[in-house]
Amino acid sequence: MKKVLIANDNQKILSLLKIEIEKHDDIEPYFAKSYKEAVDIILKHQGKFHGALLDIDLHDAKDEEIVKLANFYNIPSIIMTDIDNLETQNTLIKNDVINIISKNDHSDLVCAVNEMSRTLKNYDTTILIVDDSVIYRKILKDSLKKIKLKILEASDGVEALKILQSNKNISLILTDYDMPNMNGLELTFRLRKQYKKDQLGIIAISVVEEQNVISKFLKIGVNDFINKKFTHNEIVTRINSNLELLDLFGQIKDMANKDFLTGAYNRRFFFDTGKYVYEKSKRSKTSLAVAMIDIDKFKNINDRYGHNTGDIAIQEAKRILDNNLRESDLMARFGGEEFCVLLEDITYENVKLLFDKIKYKFQHNIIKTNQYTITYTVSIGICFGLADSLEDMIRLSDEALYIAKESGRNRVEINPNSSNPI
């Protein structure tokens, strides 16, 4: 969560803002009903806020003092006001102001909170601007820095491809059409061979108004087209809308690939991804490890403490595995209280050490709920080496898990029938 200051002296608006903010788990709100309260809150937190929703009509502040205060501490702000004077709005935008939104009705408040939530996400979002014009790159940067995006630059398509190779976390590319070495159409064509629209957003930005050029861009796969005669509000709104759409694509993928209770990957994703890992290891003749982890006597937890506590126990299992596995390890919930892990680039000795440690973590973990304090253990079965298929490795690890259960539980067993380590 990121800290956001909300300064507003209208109790009705403040109450509505609270309701909307509760819908966003990325906002940690701090409410001020006056300029003085806002000053006290900012000083208490040493000015360390990621954003602010500000009403410039506070009863104890004049001449946009609240905006000046936020600017002094480099806090990006969304201004909520009924002022429709363009000169005043332009003066405000020159400061570290993300946007100016009216406060006429509930939909305006929803818009303000949504835009702040998007800005908070932007702190961790990288975009690439591709344009041979230094001036236009600066114009874009000046607008987009206000919404806290991380910005990379390239002067043509060739440089853009090189940057993309070494920066895999780029979410969106803004590309000009007419550039030397490689123009925007060719860049888009090459990128769409590697990335789908839901993997990498591409927006064409150009002074060209010929319909055939715009049509070509759209046909080869840009997400949007913006004329270079854009205003600050237009570019910010269009960029944020495209980023929100990319996030939505990601959420849909997560819903399809992840378990609802724990957030762990599901069986289907495990097999789809695991087969690529298995084939890679087969080609390079390197060993893999497959581990099955099962909560011991899980039925007793459900029967004694209830299914809600059982769900907490399963969620806790996912947390412990997350904290002890590498980011490169593939972990999925296979159903019920059972998890499966696929590990590459690991030795037999390190596999044993890792899962002995994980077993120990479970054994000494204490779960406290509102009603109960519980502990539980896990049994772990492992296949190490490279069997005839990923399915065979899972079967062999399942056999080892059975041995661990039959031998008293709270054990780690490596299947003696696993193929010899390569």
Image (cartoon, rainbow, N blue to C red):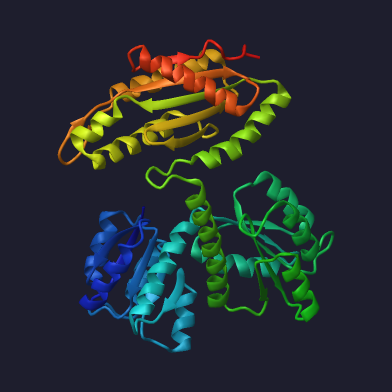
Residue at 64% over, 47% down: 167
In the rendered image of this protein, does residue 173 appear above or below residue 86?
above
The quadrant of the rendering that contains the C terminus is top right
- Where residue 113 sits, quadrant-wise, is bottom left
Q: Position of residue 287 (x, y in %)?
A: 62, 20
Which of 39/50 is in front?
Answer: 50
In the rendered image of this protein, does residue 28 appear above or below residue 331?
below
* The residue positioned farthest toward the bottom in the image shown: 85
Left or right placement of residue 245 versus residue 215 in this view: left
Q: Position of residue 404 (x, y in %)?
A: 40, 15
- Where residue 297 sits, quadrant-wise, is top left
* The residue positioned farthest toward the left in the image shown: 371
Q: Position of residue 190 (x, y in %)?
A: 78, 56
In the rendered image of this protein, does residue 316 appear above or below residue 193?
above
Q: Position of residue 77 (x, y in %)?
A: 40, 68
Residue at 30% over, 60% down: 29
